[in-house]
Image (cartoon, rainbow, N blue to C red):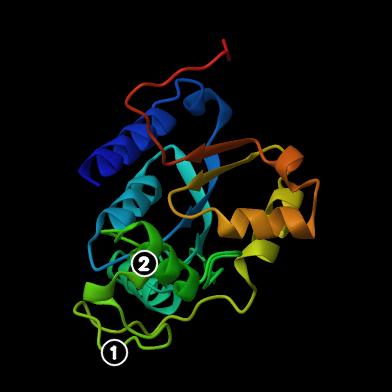
Amino acid sequence: MRLCQALAVLVLALLLACPRCASQGLRKVIIDQDEAGPAGTDLQSTLLLIQSPQTEVLGITVVTGDMWLKEEVAHTLRMLELIGRTDIPVVPGAEYPLVRTKEKTELWEQRYGRIAYIGAWTPRMYHPADQIGELKEGNPKAKPLQEDAAHFLVRTVRQFPNQVTIYAGGPMTNLALAISIDPEFPSLVKELVFMGGSLSPQTDDP
């Protein structure tokens, strides 16, 4: 987990260090992220992009990952309130995976062994998806967009064709849904930067 977090910060640092950014203007970015909070690494990576003088964050599309969607959306909205950036739209996305279910995951564990961490389904921190409660940092007054993340993604890249960088720091369910809506979506995105890592990376791509 710590290695993945360190890799995510490194990826973001490399993204922001592009020497061409100053001459080409602000880099338009959509943050597609699971936003566990308060003050978790998900929100910290979001803050890094928001506060960079080289980026213009067009929106934050949220997906269930470390926490459930509604709770993550609330943490994101409250963070934006605290830093005075409620101008950035927060867009709820996929609440559940496209294929896997909690029941199938539990069946897999019965057959092959327990998985220590399965995000919002992790038993030690599990609660129903609609249960938010009081946030430690205070509940937000700001509201998310009524539009869903997949349609927001499609609409925004069509508004700015070949100009938008998508930073995907969580499950890529929102991106998969955007492609299912508009198969041309990937060709309209300038670039995709995603959290991932390997201890022994190999590639044929020069």
The answer to whether 26 appears left or right of 137 in the picture is right
Q: Which residue is drawn at 39% across and 73% down?
A: 77
- The type of residue carrying mark 1 is Gly
Q: Which of 119 and 134 is in front in this view?
A: 119
Q: Residues within 10 Å of mark 1 (few under 14, many from 20)?
A: few
Picture quadrant of residue 137: bottom left
Q: Is residue 58 above or below residue 69?
A: above
Q: Nearer the viewer, residue 162 or 168?
A: 168
Amino acid type indicated by mark 2: Gln
Q: Please give the residue where the numbered disc 1 appears in the rendered image.
A: 133
Query: Which of the two discs, 2 and 1, labels the residue nearer the N terminus?
Result: 2
Residue 167 in the image: x percent, y percent? 49, 45
Which residue matches tag 2? 110
Q: Which residue is drawn at 40% across and 74% down?
A: 68
Res 11 quadrant in image: top left
**Disc 2 secondary structure class:** helix
The reply to whether residue 80 is visible in this rendering is: no
Q: What element carries label 1?
A: loop
Residue at the (52%, 17%) spot, across then down:
203
Task: Estimate the spatial distance between the alpha carbons at disc 2 and disc 1, rounded to whole Å.
Answer: 32 Å
Write the residue at 41% across / 61% down: 34
Residue 127 in percent (x, y) is at: 32, 83
Residue 196 image position (x, y, % from top left): 41, 38
Left or right, 30 with respect to 6, comes to right
Quadrant position of the C terminus in the picture:
top right
Percent across and percent down for residue 106 are: 40, 70
Residue 1 higher or lower than 152, as above or below: above
